[in-house]
Amino acid sequence: MAKRFEYAKNSILLVVGSGLAQVLPLAFQPYLRRTFSDVEFGLFAQYFSIVSIVALIAGLKYDASIMIPKSDRASQHILTGTVFINLCSSFLFLVLLFLFGHHFLGAAGLSQKLENYFWLMPISVFLISTNLAINYWLTRKKFFRGIVINKVSRRAVEAGARVGFASKLVKGGMIYGGVIGDLINLIVSVFQYVKSGGKIKMYRKQQVLKELKEQIDFPKYSLLPNVLNVISARVPVFLFAILYGDAILGQFDGSQQMLAIPLGLISISLSQVLYQRIVDDVNNNRKIMRFIRNNFMFLAGLSIIGVIIVMPFGVEITTIYYGDNYELSGQITQILVISYGIKFIVSPLSMTLVGLKKLKLVAIWQATYFLMTICLFFIEDMAIQDFVIIIVAIDVIAYFFYGALIYSAARKHDKKIEDLIQSQKD
């Protein structure tokens, strides 16, 4: 009962806090959408897509292993090593951008305007990847209030900066605002890290390397599959830029932003608490199937309600909120909501596989999803709505398969616990 109450309390704290964090940028979206052009939003979507992919691999996925060790000291060693790896990766990314960035943009069909922000991309990568690593530490320590403070601080500063840049019609204002928000997030995260009991000190290199070696399965089995997964998520952004141009990409980005609000509000927040709970249950040989089933029912119910509301009224909601020139974005939203609906259910539950250290299963799914998504590159001369339908079909099939893997892994874990209990009785 105490465990159930703690999980509910932490979940409510994160959901409410994330809700406040989402309200701040949400309140200014109508102004920003009417001030910045579709092209500006399309450019930011490309920038963020590139940065998010690199940020994911910057720490070699050691960040997710911060939750695993039983001692805090071992976790701090991993965090220290992860931050150092992030710094090295960001510097390497800077060098590669200035050597090959121009050719990459041309080959990928992306906007050459991104060259103006090459100097900023490695900074974004370091900020995002390091914030993620510290966030895992705070989750480990159940310091969810600190996570909420980080999110609210970041979103408040990000929204304020973007409004300021928009009022001055600064080109790249969306990008600059995001970077400033990430910088504030890191400053506040470090403060919350210390407040949660973390120490800022130079640990011995041998200790850090020892702990990194202990968790070698994370870069070994998670790095490449996770890269493929995040590329899969960003493929539609790249293809919209290539096939339809920056302005239409801006419309697609508007749809994504509209649907990402509930995903960020509840789904992502719950995944943090769920991951901590799963790791705790696994380390203490407790069953998890009932816990997974209850979360599935809760997320499925909310997802169905969202789809029922958005599918018939997507255009009206979007145009009222963004403006009449976002009618196409509303049409895309009506279709794309199905994809976000199934992601809303499965994404937080996917942390079950990480908590169970079923990294090979995760790798298999992510590689499969990548191969399915790459098929989109063979599409030419297709109506925008039809293209979105194919995206949705791929997501539904892939995430249904993902859900089946999660269910199977949880059942096997519970069966193992049952056998252990039975053997103790005998």
Image: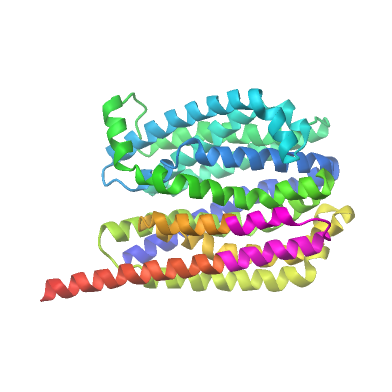
Percent across and percent down for residue 12 are 49, 59
Of residues 194 and 377, the one nearer the viewer is 377
Q: How many numbered discs sit on the rendered protein?
A: 0
Q: Which color scheme does this rendered protein use?
A: rainbow
Of residues 197 and 366, the one nearer the viewer is 366
Who's the residue at 59% across and 35% down the image?
182
- Residue 167 lies, with reference to residue 298, above or below; the image says above
For residue 161, say whether it is visible. Answer: no
Percent across and percent down for residue 134 are 44, 39
Who's the residue at 61% across and 69% down the image?
303
Q: Is residue 274 left or right of residue 116?
A: left
Quadrant in which residue 62 is drawn: top left
Who's the residue at 59% across and 68% down the image?
397
Who's the residue at 12% across and 75% down the image?
425
Quadrant in which residue 171 is drawn: top right
Percent across and percent down for residue 117 are 70, 28
Q: Is residue 263 left or right of residue 61?
A: right
Q: Main secondary structure of the magenta part?
A: helix
Quarter holding the N terminus is bottom left
* Residue 403, magenta (yes or no): no
Percent across and percent down for residue 37 are 84, 41
Of residues 250 and 265, the one nearer the viewer is 250
Q: Extreme front residue here?
A: 378
- Residue 339 lies, with reference to residue 98, above or below; the image says below
Question: Where does the magenta region start and end?
Answer: 371-398
- Residue 339 lies, with reference to residue 256, above or below; the image says below
Q: Extreme left residue here?
A: 426
- Residue 213 lies, with reference to residue 221, above or below; the image says above
* Residue 396, magenta (yes or no): yes
Q: Extreme right residue here?
A: 324
